[in-house]
Image (spheres, rainbow, N blue to C red):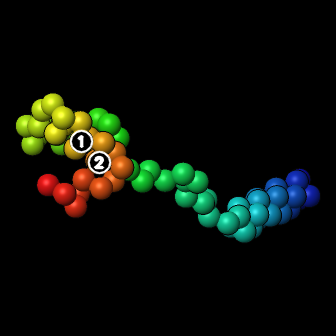
Amino acid sequence: MRVLAAFTATAVLGCGLAVAADPPAAPSATPVKHPSLKVCNKQADAKQLTGPSRAQFVKACRAGTSSKAS
């Protein structure tokens, strides 16, 4: 019985050390850089844009350049 308890304690301690030695998880390989079409459309709705100006805004928004232009 003591052998089993010693083996179990050693296994638990060994697993704990192995988990502690693992490096932290890396962040996503492809972070989101630009807003989605849904977000850009909501912004265009809020600005009440229509027609070509809306299309231009959404295109610029998707490219990530709309925050500089109004």
Q: Residue furthest top?
A: 51
Q: Residue furthest left?
A: 48
How dense is the environment of label 1, judged by Cα within 10 Å: few (below 14), some, or many (20 and up)? Answer: some
Out of 55 and 14, give the one closest to the viewer.
Answer: 55
In this orientation, which residue lies closer to the viewer: 11 or 44?
A: 44
Which residue appears at 22% of the width and 44% of the height? 57
Image height of 48 relative to 61, above or below = above
Left or right: residue 50 compared with residue 39? left
Q: In which quarter of the image is residue 42?
A: top left
Q: Is residue 45 left or right of residue 9?
A: left
In which quadrant of the rendered view does residue 56 lie? top left
What residue would you read off at disc 2? 60
Q: What element carries label 2?
A: helix
Question: Would you say 64 lies left or right of 22 here?
Answer: left
Residue placed most toward the observer, 64 or 42: 64
Residue sitting nearer the eye, 19 or 2: 19
Disc 2 marks a residue whose amino acid type is Ala
User: Residue 26: percent from the left, percent from the top?
Assistant: 60, 60
Q: What is the secondary structure assignment of the residue under circle 1? A: helix
For the point 32% across and 37% down, which residue is it? 37
- Give the quarter of the figure containing the C terminus: bottom left
Residue 56: mark = 1
The residue shown at (23%, 57%) is: 67
Name the kind of residue labelled 1 in the image. Gln
Task: Name the spot of residue 8 as percent of width and height, x first.
Answer: 82, 56
CA distance for labels 1 and 2: 6 Å
- Give coordinates of residue 69: x percent, y percent: 19, 57
Contact, CB < 8 Å: mark 1 with mark 2?
Answer: yes
The extreme right residue here reads 3
